[in-house]
Amino acid sequence: MSSPMTNWPAGGADPLLDALQADHLPDLGHVDMAGLLCDPRLGRMALVSSFGAESAALLHYVTRVHPDIPVLFIETGCHFSETLAYRDLLAGLLGLNLVNLRPVPGLIAQEDPDGTLHARDPNMCCMLRKTFPLADALEGFDTWISGRKRYQGQTRAALPAIERDGSHLKVNPLAFWDQADVEAYFAAHDLPRHPLVDRGYASIGCAPCTRPVRAGEDLRAGRWADNPDKTECGIHLGPDGRFARRRPH
């Protein structure tokens, strides 16, 4: 029997997920990520990127295998200008098939007319600006790829490399990388850093809800720092996730 450290965390399972894990990720000592990313059973894939502090590593890693993969960026309308400039820089440098997703203007006008929803109800703000647009965009895909990693915080400490996310499969290719691996990858491939990294931003989201990380803090402590119960934006549904809504006409 495997030791607890090599067991996969509990979560949604089905025959396809079990088969992919058995073939490419039987335990933490045998991880064939390249084989997984090339497995035709993943179907049509998209890569979702925030173009944040470590995003260049995932973008480079995956597009060396799938150069034309759609790269979905959720343009919330609240990003730092530095993030938008970094997105454009990486899109040109890596030749990305970039797709910008935007919230429904009518919903924003109705629910956030004065631009203060992030302070009043951050969960609703994320849902309107991130979750809804991504859910719509992913309807045409079977699998999506995320850049989450185990070392990024307690809420991600047991992150698997492949999981169910509602009706989709989700692959986290860098789940088992540590910070040294990320730094080494940036150096090996001469990848540019997000301009806010040097100013203490370890995890970068929307400008109103992101601050620099202080010494000794969790890497994601700068996200929603005024809302300690909020640790994720809501785009990751989990194995039993279901998402449905009425679309405005």
Image (cartoon, helix red, strand yellow):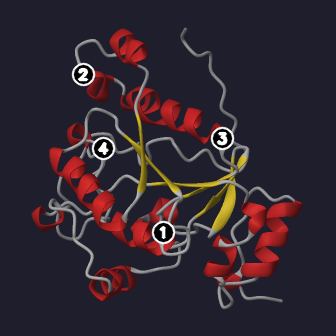
Which mark is first along the chain, 2 or 4? 2
Where the N terminus falls, by quadrant? bottom right
Which mark is first along the chain, 4 or 3? 3
Where the C terminus falls, by quadrant? top right
How far apart are the alpha carbons under marks 3 and 4? Answer: 31 Å
Where does label 1 land, which residue?
63
Which mark is first along the chain, 1 or 4? 1
Amino acid type of the residue that numbered disc 4 sits on in the rendered structure: Trp
How far apart are the alpha carbons under marks 3 and 1? Answer: 19 Å
Quarter of the image where one finds residue 125: top left
Q: Nearer the viewer, residue 55 or 219?
A: 55
Instruction: Decide: is 175 above or below 96.
Output: below
- Relative to 42, is 87 on the left or the right? left
Where does label 3 land, which residue?
140
- Relative to 58, is 40 on the left or the right? right
Q: Position of residue 69 (x, y in %)?
A: 54, 58
Q: Are marks 4 and 1 in contact (CB under 8 Å)?
A: no
Which mark is first along the chain, 3 or 2? 2
Where does label 2 land, which residue?
116
How far apart are the alpha carbons under marks 4 and 1? Answer: 31 Å
